[in-house]
Image: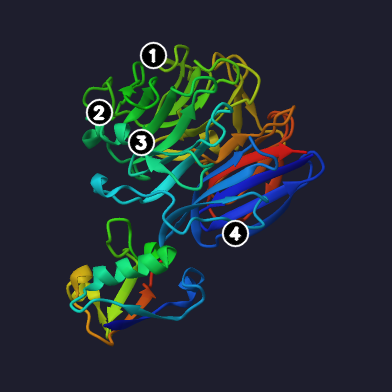
């Protein structure tokens, strides 16, 4: 299956300038599988989103079809073919 | 002669450059805007020196970068340059300290991190590996966190013996290895931990910074969380050298690059009152290994001056007549080109200064 990842402007230096990534995944894949695939193709982008333990960084929000994955099953959130995954920096900072 | 100051702030890196023997400075930045720059280092084993920077983005996490052209371009590995292995069950919060190794190990660079861990690079600082022996030390579960977090903030490789390294952490104190990192032992005898029920523990001290003497690598100077100390036996024991200072609290401790016994300190009033003593902006210098101290303020702001100098925000350079530099939490940066006798303001109104390092080269 394939999911579409929307990359915010601030991270596009780490996605070869792309605002959208089409990522191939096996059927039944979950968010951690997607992060792993992003890491295989765009390792800097992946480590901006999640730490070396695979945990999504505190001030990064990842939405699956418009739902914050933290409110779903976090990195175990199931993904569907054609899902849209949006990476958005949270409102934070001083 | 070119001189460069790397100024790490909580919102990016600034670089100040002088072409007139450190009389005037041109400041550029911010580089890595909005990143916390806890660690900066010049590796003067190459010319021009390699500039190392530890950057932590509030949203996107920590990384380290190097520049071989003094900040015009930066190199950052795609894969995390500093990361805990899966077996450590930990994630890097930030790199607090980057320390080039000795001349005898030209590609070795050390990194001290939060959580408290030591990493070693053997490729000039492009990638690092965890020093597992220290990470697995049986004391580690009892190491605590100070206000700024739990971190190894000081790494001092021995200049002649690659098997010997001293680290310091807050809290936890000083640890040493003399067998190339296979084993580590606490090294805090004489350093007081007034905030613990037993004020003289084997470990658990809140050592803020340690500096090595320019001439004798077995002599160290430490600024503690209250307490200023010297060790004459490679860190085995420590004696107070605070008597000549107006306070024994502070963060920074810096040694002269060549003159034995010459050290610099910026005392603060107390843990409970973190201002310059008497609100005076003064550097204190000792020329006799801490036996006596003299205040230095020629050219520094008049009282009252409120901002503090953090542990890595003071340094010396490698010039024949050493420069001394410090930055403050209010974003002021000052320089002395005569070893502290007189000072000029390099720049002002920067974000909070976290780290300052300087180098000169032809």
Foreground label between 1 and 4: 4
Picture disc at residue B31 = 4
Tell me which numbered mark, 1 or 2, is placed earlier along the sequence.
2
Foreground label between 2 and 3: 3
Picture disc at residue B131 = 3
Foreground label between 2 and 4: 4
* Crowd tier of the residue under label 2, counting other residues whose Cα lies within 10 Å: few below 14, some 14–19, many 20 or above: few
Pointer 2: what residue? B196
Is residue A72 shown left or right of residue A82? left
Residue at the spot 21% in from the left edge and 26% down from the top edge: B197
Chain under callout 4: B
Residue at the spot 78% in from the left edge and 38% down from the top edge: B362
Is residue B13 shown left or right of residue B115? right
Vertical comparison of B188 with B278: above or below: above
Structural distance between the alpha carbons of marks 1 and 2:
19 Å
Tell me which numbered mark, 1 or 3, is placed earlier along the sequence.
3
């Amino acid at each position: 299956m394939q999911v579409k990842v929307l990359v915010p402007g601030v991270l596009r230096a780490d996605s070869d300038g792309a605002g959208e990534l089409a990522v191939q995944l096996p059927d039944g894949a979950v968010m951690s599988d997607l992060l792993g695939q992003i890491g295989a193709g765009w390792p800097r982008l992946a480590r901006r989103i999640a730490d070396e333990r695979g945990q999504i960084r505190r001030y990064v929000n990842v939405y699956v079809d418009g739902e914050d994955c933290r409110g779903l099953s976090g990195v175990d959130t199931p993904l569907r073919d054609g899902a849209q995954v949006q990476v958005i920096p949270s409102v934070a900072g001083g | 002669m070119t001189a460069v100051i790397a100024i790490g702030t909580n919102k990016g890196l600034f670089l100040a450059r002088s072409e007139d023997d450190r009389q005037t400075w041109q400041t550029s930045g911010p580089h890595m805007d909005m990143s916390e720059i806890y660690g900066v280092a010049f590796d003067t084993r190459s010319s021009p020196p390699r500039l190392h920077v530890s950057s932590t983005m509030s949203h996107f996490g920590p990384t380290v970068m190097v520049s071989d052209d003094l900040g015009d371009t930066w190199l950052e590995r795609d894969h995390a340059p500093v990361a805990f292995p899966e077996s450590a069950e930990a994630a890097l919060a930030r790199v607090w300290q980057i320390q080039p190794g000795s001349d005898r190990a030209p590609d070795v660079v050390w990194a001290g991190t939060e959580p408290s861990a030591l990493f070693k690079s053997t490729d000039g600082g492009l990638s690092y590996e965890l020093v597992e022996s220290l990470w697995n030390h049986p004391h580690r579960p009892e190491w605590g966190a100070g206000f700024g977090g739990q971190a190894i903030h000081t790494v001092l490789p021995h200049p002649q013996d690659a098997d010997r390294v001293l680290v310091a952490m807050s809290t936890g104190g000083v640890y040493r290895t003399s067998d190339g990192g296979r084993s580590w032992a606490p090294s805090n005898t004489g350093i007081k931990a007034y905030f613990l029920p037993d004020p003289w523990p084997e470990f658990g001290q809140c050592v803020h910074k340690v500096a090595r003497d320019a001439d004798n690598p077995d002599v160290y100077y430490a600024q503690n969380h209250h307490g200023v100390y010297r060790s004459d036996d490679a860190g085995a024991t420590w004696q107070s050298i605070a008597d000549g200072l107006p306070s024994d609290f502070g963060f920074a401790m810096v040694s002269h690059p060549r003159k034995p016994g010459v050290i610099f300190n910026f005392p603060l009033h107390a843990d409970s009152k973190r201002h310059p003593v008497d609100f005076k902006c003064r550097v204190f210098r000792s020329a006799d290994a801490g036996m006596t101290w003299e205040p230095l303020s020629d050219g520094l702001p008049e009282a009252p001056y409120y901002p503090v100098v953090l542990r890595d925000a003071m340094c010396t350079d490698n010039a024949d007549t050493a420069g001394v530099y410090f930055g403050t939490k209010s974003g002021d940066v000052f320089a002395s080109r005569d070893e502290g006798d007189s000072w000029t303001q390099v720049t002002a109104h920067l974000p909070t200064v976290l780290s300052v390092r300087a180098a000169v080269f032809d």
